[in-house]
Image (cartoon, grey):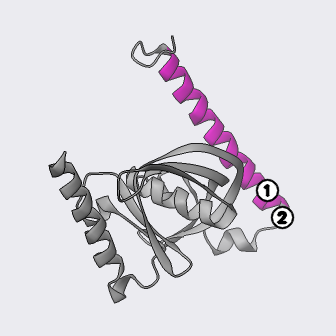
């Protein structure tokens, strides 16, 4: 157990040290997998303070909206469905289990961090947009967004079907 606590302490310290680097001034979060750790943890900026979340999971999420995001990895913009109200369950840096509710802006950042922990990028499921999207009429943008939502729904239905047919994932 001490070994795990030592590793947790190392991860927390490394997250603080890395995010304190001037090169990270514009970052709102940093994930452990971005700095070489396989354990699930991220550090998130609250006002001018940083807070660490170990082993985070969504306990609850509501109010799905389409959000426009910039992906620094691809240097492109995407429209992505994000929950604007989330409750995150996690272990704090001392190992105590806690839960916290995030409102609209913070929940989007938390969702981005959780995607990062999973190795998911905006380009994996977001709708890439460019200047032509902004120049399109309202009707044209609505048509593109509706097709995107239909594709997401189709993918969800395929995944649901695959899961229900797999003996290892069937609900009992």
* Residue 12, numbered label: none
Q: Position of residue 96 (x, y in %)?
A: 41, 50
- Judging by the rendered image, the residue that carries numbered circle 1 is 142
Residue drawn at (65%, 67%) of the image:
105
Observer-nearest residue: 86 or 68? 86
| Side of 87 relative to 115 (left or right) | right
Q: Quadrant of residue 31?
A: bottom left
Residue drawn at (47%, 52%) of the image:
124
Residue drawn at (17%, 50%) of the image:
2
- Judging by the rendered image, the residue that carries numbered circle 2 is 138
Residue drawn at (36%, 57%) of the image:
41
How would you rate the neighbour count of disc 1 (Cα within 10 Å): few for under 14, some for 14-19, many for 20 or more? few
Asked if residue 77 lies in the magenta stretch, the reply is no
Give the CA separation, mark 1 to mark 2.
Answer: 6 Å
Observer-nearest residue: 130 or 3? 3
Identify the residue at the far left of this view.
3
| Residue 98 in view in this figure | yes
Residue 155 position (above or below residue 134): above
Q: Position of residue 146 (x, y in %)?
A: 74, 48
Magenta span of residues: 139-164
| Residue 128 in view in this figure | no
Q: Where's the N terminus, which quadrant? A: top left
Q: Quadrant of residue 27?
A: bottom left
What is the number of callouts on the image? 2
């Amino acid at each position: 157990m001490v070994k795990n606590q030592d590793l947790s302490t190392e991860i927390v310290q490394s997250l603080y040290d890395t995010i304190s680097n001037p090169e990270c001034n514009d970052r709102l979060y940093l994930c452990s997998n971005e700095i070489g750790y396989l354990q699930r943890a991220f550090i998130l900026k609250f006002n001018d303070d940083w807070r660490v979340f170990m082993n985070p999971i969504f306990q609850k999420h509501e109010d799905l909206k389409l959000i426009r995001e910039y992906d620094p990895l691809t240097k492109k913009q995407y429209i992505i469905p994000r929950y604007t109200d989330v409750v995150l369950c996690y272990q704090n840096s001392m190992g105590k289990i806690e839960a916290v509710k995030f409102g609209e802006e913070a929940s989007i950042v938390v969702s981005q961090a959780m995607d990062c922990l999973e190795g998911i990028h905006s380009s994996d499921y977001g709708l890439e947009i460019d200047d032509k999207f902004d120049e399109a009429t309202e009707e044209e943008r609505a048509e593109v967004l509706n097709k995107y939502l239909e594709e997401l729904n189709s993918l969800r239905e395929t995944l649901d079907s695959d899961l229900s047919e797999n003996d290892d994932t069937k609900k009992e």
